[in-house]
Amino acid sequence: QVQLVESGGGLGQPGGSLRLSCAASGTIFNIYTMVWHRQAPGKQRELVAVITNGGTTNYADSVKGRFTISRDNAKNTVYLQMNSLKPEDTAVYYCGAKISLRVESTASDYWGQGTQVTVSS
């Protein structure tokens, strides 16, 4: 049983910063790609940032230069550092991870419950 739990959401001011965390727990053999998605009311879910098991990162154009994704493999945790926040960053942010449970098992995708980020003055 694998569980992903996001934390760090809340109210931020335009131009301010927030840091989201997502910790994976349970029976885990290996964690491969980890991602952050977000979904605003009336909008489709948007892929925000990706980090591979090799450390390669990619970002949506809307957050490039402002957000940084990182991971701590010893803690099974992925982070999203959000700087220079804009009101349009307001959304529910979800973390996801591709995880294998056993040495010979195929990897599957897991998702957290989400954390609300609101950017307003």
Image (cartoon, rainbow, N blue to C red):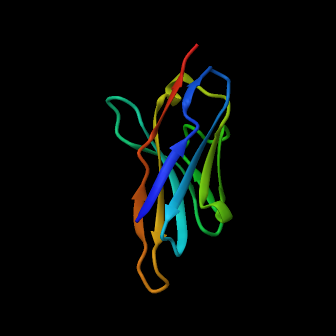
The percent coordinates of residue 33 (x first, y second) are: 53, 64
Front-lying residue, 95 or 69: 95
Q: What percent of the width, then of the height, locates residue 110?
A: 41, 60
Tell me if residue 6 comes above or below residue 1 in the rendering.
above
- Residue depicted at 47% across the width and 54% down the height: 4
Q: Is residue 18 above or below residue 47?
A: above
Residue at image position (58%, 13%) is: 121
Residue beneath the point at 43% across and 50% down: 112
Is 76 displayed left or right of 1 in the figure?
right
Q: Quadrant of the N terminus?
A: bottom left
Front one among 41 and 21 = 21
Residue name at image x 60 percent, y 68 percent:
53
Residue 44's x, y, as percent?
34, 39
Which percent across, then down, holds residue 34?
53, 59
Residue 16 versus residue 102: which sits nearer the camera?
Answer: 102
Number of residue marks: 0
